[in-house]
Image: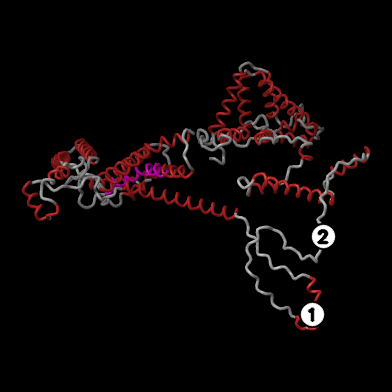
């Protein structure tokens, strides 16, 4: 921090009086921290680092004061810098008057310095206020423009976030969001930009704002008087003497007629152009997608069918010609060029000659109910065959029949829908397989178990209580096995976790979870964000909440010395007892510790059952509130 301040004041020529005053205040604040670190017994490391740079900071302070005093020799201060200059001179004057001079020369030098400071103070007060630089005025104008735009878009954005405002289209919504984000980012960075412009030195001649006092009253009055003067077509030479005689000053352009574009106007024009380009790009992309869908929906044009082969009767009628010219038959003549035929409308084959007999079409299968009774055994065999879907031949036949029925159903839908409702959706419905009623209607499917139920079960899955409810935990143990089991029980029942639960976090990590005040409200539909956070955090931190509830119950039992307190004391005594007691061998101690832990859980559940309903609701609300306001590990 001190190195950054020293690096910023290395070159003082590029700062205005406002910038010099700002850096002087920063250096003085660092010097105060350095003095505090030197006077403190246990200073912080960053204050110690600042104290090591104290000599350099004092040198920078002296250089800043000299630069500020030199800039006040010929004061050229703005309305922000004048109060700073007066405060600086009064501070230096008070510091100089508070010093004691011993000799006559020192007193004369002190009096001279005091007179000099008073003269500078009077000059500063009597000096005229100069306007801010052009950069400062542009930044201030942009800030005003952004504030005006923020007053317009912020209430609309709040209504949209609350669901009380709807936009006509997604394009309008995206354009509004971009406008809101640009305005917000501009307002966030405007303060730093203004401070940087104020700290920069004013180079060149500082000109006053010609529109600071409002529009000049000249040009409208001159325009009224110009109607009685010489007409404009006579030329400028004839109008100039009249203007000199009347003494009317030359009109100046108004603010609205100025050709200078401010920073806010340029920023708004750039944002508008960018929004228009994005909207145009979205419209072009949407039109291209519509064109692709229309091209995909167009009916396919059937290829031109080649001419039919010659009839076999003609080929059989001339066998002698084919035998007389074997060489010509070996080499097939090139086919004649196919004539351009019009596109076929119907998908029908060309007509065959009458000599070729067409086979009759196969008869349609007639589905009839069997009129013969096969008996009970035969019906059971048929049911068994229906229940076996892995057979090859019946499965293929049923699949073929099923596909044919689906196609017929699709064609029937096309005929019913006509030209208006048919198309791609009808084809998709025809090709989609029908649900089989044999497998789904016989068994009822249960709803899926929520994820948080599994997380709650996992919170108690690895606990010591679950292990003690198994039969293997109570088998006979030898001396060595009992000592290992006792060490395991002591490790699984530490002081921070007397219930033997699996804590997902250490207690210091649990206390140090990030508190963000709840999830941010969004306009997304579905399960709210706060419900999702409770479903995630409550099962995850359930072991910690149960441990805290155990502590509260122990404190409540302490007020009346209840049985629950003695059960907790029994478990603690068995854990803290010396390992090698002749009256308490290891196998017996393991059995007693396990029984004490089960008794502790039983009395804990009994205390929860006897707890007042309002106390239960209060503790549950505390746990839910903590799970709502803290962020998980992924969110933090």
**Looking at the picture, how far across and down is residue 515, in whole percent?**
51, 34
| Mark 1: secondary structure | helix
Query: Is residue 199 in the magenta section?
Result: yes
Which secondary structure type mostly characterizes the magenta part of the structure?
helix
Q: Nearer the viewer, residue 86 or 581?
A: 86
Assess disc 2: are there few (<14), some (14-19) or many (≥20) residues with their C-alpha within 10 Å of its C-alpha. Answer: few
Question: Where does residue 429 sit, x and y in percent of width and height?
Answer: 68, 46
Distance from Cα at disc 2 to Cα at disc 1? 30 Å
**Which residue, as the protein is rendered here, is positioned at the far left?**
245
Say if mark 2 contacts mark 1, CB within 8 Å. Answer: no
Identity of the residue furthest to the top in this view = 560
* Residue drawn 73% across the image and 48% down it: 408
Question: Could you say which is closer to the camera, residue 360 or residue 509?
Answer: 360
Left or right for 550, reference 485:
left
Residue identified by numbered label 1 = 322
Q: Secondary structure at mark 2?
A: loop
Identify the residue at horizontal 77%, vertical 40% (top origin): 437
Q: Which residues are magenta?
A: 181-200
Judge whether 11 appears above or below 155 on screen. Answer: below
Counting residues from the start of the chain, the first of labels 2 and 1 encountered is 1
Query: Residue 236, image x and y in percent?
Result: 12, 55
Quickly name the residue at label 2. Answer: 359
* 305 on left or right of 475: left
Q: Is residue 82 left or right of residue 360?
A: left
Q: What percent of the width, then of the height, locates residue 311? A: 77, 70
Question: Which of the 4 image quadrants contains residue 295?
Answer: bottom right
């Amino acid at each position: 921090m001190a190195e950054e301040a020293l690096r910023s004041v290395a070159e003082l020529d590029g700062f205005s009086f406002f910038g010099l005053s700002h850096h002087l205040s920063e250096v003085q604040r660092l010097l105060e921290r350095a003095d505090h670190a030197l006077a403190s017994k246990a200073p912080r490391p960053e204050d110690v680092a600042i104290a090591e740079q104290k000599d350099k900071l004092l040198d920078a302070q002296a250089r800043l004061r000299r630069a500020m005093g030199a800039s006040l020799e010929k004061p050229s201060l703005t309305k922000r810098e004048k109060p700073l200059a007066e405060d600086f001179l009064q501070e230096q004057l008070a510091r100089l008057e508070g010093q004691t001079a011993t000799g006559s020369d020192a007193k004369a030098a002190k009096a001279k310095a005091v007179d000099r400071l008073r003269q500078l103070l009077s000059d500063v007060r009597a000096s005229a206020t100069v306007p801010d630089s052009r950069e400062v005025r542009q930044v201030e104008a942009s800030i005003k423009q952004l504030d005006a735009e923020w007053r317009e878009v912020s209430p609309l954005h709040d209504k949209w976030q609350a669901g009380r405002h709807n936009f006509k289209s997604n394009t309008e919504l995206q354009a509004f969001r971009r406008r809101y984000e640009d305005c917000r980012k501009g307002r966030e960075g405007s303060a730093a930009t203004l401070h940087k412009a104020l700290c920069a030195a004013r180079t060149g001649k500082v000109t006053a704002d010609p529109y600071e006092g409002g529009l000049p009253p000249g040009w409208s009055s001159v325009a009224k008087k110009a109607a009685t003067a010489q007409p404009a077509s006579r030329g400028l030479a004839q109008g100039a003497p009249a203007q000199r005689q009347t003494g009317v000053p030359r009109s100046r352009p108004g603010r609205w007629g100025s050709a200078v574009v401010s920073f806010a106007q340029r920023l708004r024009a750039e944002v508008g152009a960018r929004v228009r380009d994005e909207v145009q790009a979205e419209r072009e992309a949407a039109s291209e997608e519509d064109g692709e869908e229309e091209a995909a929906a167009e009916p396919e044009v059937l290829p031109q069918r080649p001419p039919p082969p010659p009839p076999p009767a003609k080929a059989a009628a001339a066998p002698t010609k084919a035998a007389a010219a074997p060489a010509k038959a070996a080499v097939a003549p090139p086919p004649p060029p196919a004539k351009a035929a019009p596109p076929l409308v119907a998908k029908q084959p060309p007509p065959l000659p009458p000599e070729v007999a067409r086979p009759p079409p196969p008869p349609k299968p007639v589905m009839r109910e069997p009129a013969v009774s096969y008996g009970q055994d035969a019906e059971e065999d048929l049911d068994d065959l229906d229940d076996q879907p892995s057979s090859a031949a019946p499965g293929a036949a049923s699949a073929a029949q099923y596909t044919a029925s689906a196609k017929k159903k699709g064609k029937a839908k096309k005929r019913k829908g006509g030209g208006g409702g048919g198309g791609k959706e009808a084809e998709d419905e025809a090709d989609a397989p029908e649900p089989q009623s044999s497998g789904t209607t016989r068994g009822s499917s249960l709803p899926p178990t929520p994820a948080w139920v599994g997380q709650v079960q996992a919170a108690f899955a690895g606990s010591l209580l679950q292990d003690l409810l198994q039969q293997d935990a109570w088998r006979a143990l030898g001396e060595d096995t009992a000592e290992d089991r006792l060490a395991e029980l002591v490790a699984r029942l530490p002081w921070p976790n007397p219930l033997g639960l699996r804590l997902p976090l250490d207690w210091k990590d649990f206390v140090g979870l990030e508190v963000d005040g709840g999830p941010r409200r969004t306009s997304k539909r579905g399960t709210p964000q706060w419900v999702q956070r409770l479903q995630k955090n409550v099962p995850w931190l359930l072991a910690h909440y149960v441990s805290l509830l155990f502590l509260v119950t122990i404190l409540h039992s302490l007020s009346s010395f209840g049985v629950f307190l003695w059960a907790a004391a029994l478990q603690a005594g068995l854990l803290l007892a010396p390992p090698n007691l002749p009256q308490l061998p290891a196998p017996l101690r393991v059995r007693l510790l396990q029984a004490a832990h089960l008794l502790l859980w039983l009395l804990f559940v009994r205390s929860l059952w006897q707890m007042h309903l309002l106390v239960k609701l209060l503790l549950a609300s505390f746990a839910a509130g903590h799970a709502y306001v803290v962020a998980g590990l992924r969110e933090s």
